[in-house]
Image (spheres, helix red, strand yellow):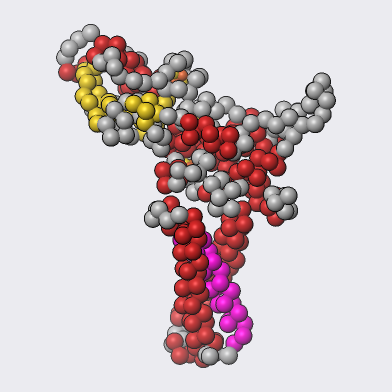
């Protein structure tokens, strides 16, 4: 791993800390408050703030996990450096597609 | 020497190369006996063909490291009483290094990585007769002092999972030395150390397991040194110094 990848991985972890906490706290308050899924979606639909919040979340998580998977592919599954990097990128795209699809759902596109 | 079973050690020793096997020996137990004493007893009394390495017998040279009951140790300072399990010892060569024969490994890759990590002094430009002043309380001096007493035994290298997973990883000992070299303020090319350790095989591959620090017989902490290198390479990389 190079310092650039290291920075990206630590940076994305750093970005995720407040996002994860906010996500969990908001979900817990909402559920405790007795809101149903529809009522929650009614509040997030059309909200640019939540769309941006979760988009940043999805990008950070995908990049973070992709770099981790690249290391695992190289160290555990014996893929060469290049093959592991390609596998890592494919994994990033996979997570991005899943995550952004969810964001579109929350925003209501 | 008594021959009662209580006073006998059952010893398994690795014989042959990578595809060798364990052989059994019975060795009389003695007070204050070290694992190296056991191996020497076998070589002198039971099997003269047994190959192993040692030099100083007092924990200075770093040549006697072996795997004892599954863990890498300096055998000349490891007392049998501390590591034997029910009177049994299993002694193998160090892991993560090619086996030459029996308990002797080929340390070439280990030392080549010290060179690769630039774990050596590069003189600066100053005139040869000026004496550098390095106050003992200086931050760099303290960091170098904490890392410098390595005896090159290879125990940490043998204990590191990342070395086992990817044989091109520079490993704890070479990186620990690079950290000492980087903190030598008299060095003429300190950024050169950071360049050497920030490649794809360098310090950022460390998983911070601390297995190296746990096993180092002289209580060094390569994990800490590597963390220092990670910070220093990160700063240098952000400043663009690594690509110059
Ligand atoms: S802390 Fe790093 S160098 Fe030490 S054993 Fe773990 S991975 Fe290897
Ligand atoms: S750091 Fe410790 S374990 Fe590693 S080679 Fe040096 S003395 Fe041996
Ligand atoms: S023989 Fe020198 S350190 Fe063990």
Asked whether A67 falls inside the magenta stretch, the response is yes
Q: Main secondary structure of the magenta part?
A: helix
Residue A96 counted in the magenta span: no
Tell me residue B235's x, y (percent): 69, 51
| Residue bounds of the magenta highlight | A47-70
Location of residue B103 (image quadrant): top left
Give me the residue at 58% from left, 82% from top. Answer: A51
Quadrant containing the N terminus of chain B is top left
Whether residue B241 sits left or right of residue B9 in the image: it is right
In percent of width and height, residue B200 lies at 55, 50
Res B228 seen here: no
Is B104 placed above or below B196 here? above
Front residue of A6 and A33: A6
x 46%, y 68%: residue: A91
Asked if residue A108 shows in the view, the reply is yes
In the rendered image, the vertical position of residue B96 relative to residue A24, given as above or below: above
Q: Residue at x 52, y 77 (%)?
A: A26
B221 with respect to B89 (left or right): right
In this orientation, which residue lies closer to the viewer: A15 or B156? B156
Position of residue A77 in the picture relative to residue B186 (left or right) = left
- Give the image location of residue B91, x and y in percent: 31, 27
Query: Is B208 situated above or below B59?
Result: below
Whole-percent x, y for residue A31 in the image:
45, 81
């Amino acid at each position: 791993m190079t310092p650039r990848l290291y920075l990206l991985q630590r940076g994305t972890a750093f970005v995720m800390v407040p996002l994860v906490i906010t996500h969990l706290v908001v979900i817990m308050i909402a559920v405790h408050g007795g809101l149903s899924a529809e009522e929650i979606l009614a509040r997030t639909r059309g909200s640019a703030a939540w769309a941006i919040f979760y988009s940043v979340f999805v990008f950070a998580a995908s990049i973070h996990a992709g770099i981790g998977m690249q290391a695992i592919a190289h160290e555990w599954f014996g893929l060469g450096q290049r093959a592991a990097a390609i596998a890592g990128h494919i994994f990033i795209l996979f997570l991005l597609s899943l995550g952004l699809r969810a964001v579109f759902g929350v925003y209501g596109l | 020497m008594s021959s009662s079973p209580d006073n006998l050690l059952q010893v398994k020793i690795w014989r042959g190369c990578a595809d060798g096997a364990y052989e059994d020996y019975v060795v009389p137990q003695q007070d204050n006996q070290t694992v190296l004493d056991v191996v020497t007893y076998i070589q002198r009394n039971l099997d003269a063909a047994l190959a192993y390495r040692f030099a100083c017998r007092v924990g200075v040279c770093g040549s006697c490291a072996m795997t004892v009951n599954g863990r890498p140790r300096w055998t000349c300072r490891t007392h049998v009483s501390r590591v034997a399990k029910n009177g049994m010892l299993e002694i193998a060569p160090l892991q993560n290094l090619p086996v030459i024969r029996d308990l002797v490994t080929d340390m070439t890759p280990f030392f080549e990585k010290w060179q690769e990590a630039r774990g050596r002094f590069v003189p600066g430009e100053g005139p040869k007769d000026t004496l550098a002043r390095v106050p003992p309380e200086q931050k760099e001096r303290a960091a170098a002092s904490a890392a410098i007493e390595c005896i090159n035994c290879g125990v940490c290298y043998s204990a590191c999972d990342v070395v086992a997973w990817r044989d091109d990883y520079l490993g704890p000992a070479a990186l620990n030395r690079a950290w000492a070299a980087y903190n030598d303020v008299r060095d003429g090319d300190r950024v050169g150390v950071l360049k050497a350790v920030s490649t794809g095989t360098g310090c950022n591959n460390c998983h911070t397991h601390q297995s190296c620090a746990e096993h180092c017989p002289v209580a060094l902490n390569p994990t800490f040194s590597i963390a220092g290198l990670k910070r220093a390479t990160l700063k240098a990389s952000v400043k663009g110094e690594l690509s110059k």
